[in-house]
Image (cartoon, grey):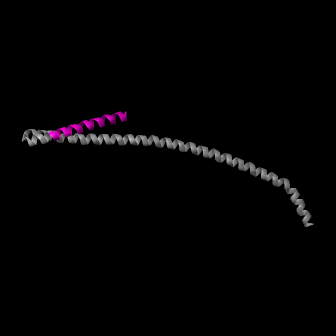
Amino acid sequence: QGEAEAGRLQLEVKGLQDQRARLELELKLASSSRKFAEAAELSAELKALCVKLDGDEDVALQQQVLEQVETEKASLAAESAREAALQRELQQEQRSLDRRRFDLLLEHLEAVRAVLPEAEAAQAELLS
C-alpha cells in the first residue's frame, strides 16, 4: 500500500515538474512579448505550483523514508529472531558439553578410585 502511494506521489511530482517547466517557458514568452498581465498571471500560477510541488516532494520523501524505516524494522526483527535461535542453539551445545565434561569427570573419578588401593599398597610398601 505504501509503495503504491509513493509511486503515485512520484508520478504526481513528475507531472508538476513538467507543468512548472511549461509555465516557465510561457512566462518567458509572455515577458518577451510584453504581455505583462499574462506574465503576471503565469508568474502567480508558477509560484502556486512551486509551493505545491515543494509540499508534494516533501510528502514523497517522507513516504520513502517511512518505507525504508518499515523495511529496516522487518530486517531488524528477522535478525533478532535469528539471534535468538542462535542463542538457543548455543545454550543447547553448552549443556551438551557440560554433560560430556561431567561424564568424563565421573570416569576419571572411577579410574582414580580403581587405582587408589594399588597406590595405597605401593605407598605402604615403600614406607615399610
- Secondary structure mostly seen in the magenta stretch: helix
Quadrant of the rendered structure where residue 31 is? top left
Q: Residue furthest bottom?
A: 127
The x, y position of residue 38, in whole percent, is 9, 38
Quadrant location of the C terminus in the rendered image? bottom right
Q: Residue at x 62, y 46 (%)?
A: 91
Stretch of the chain drawn in magenta:
1-25
Magenta highlight on residue 12: yes
The x, y position of residue 2, in whole percent, is 36, 35
> Does residue 20 sit above or below 118 in this rendering?
above
Left or right: where 39 falls relative to 91: left
Q: Residue at x 13, y 42 (%)?
A: 28
Quadrant location of the N terminus in the rendered image? top left
**Camera-side residue of 120 and 55:** 55
Quadrant of the rendered structure where residue 21 is? top left
**Camera-side residue of 97 and 18:** 18
Magenta highlight on residue 41: no
Left or right: where 82 falls relative to 37: right
Quadrant of the rendered structure where residue 69 is? top left
The x, y position of residue 65, in whole percent, is 36, 43
Q: Residue at x 61, y 46 (%)?
A: 90
The x, y position of residue 11, in whole percent, is 29, 35
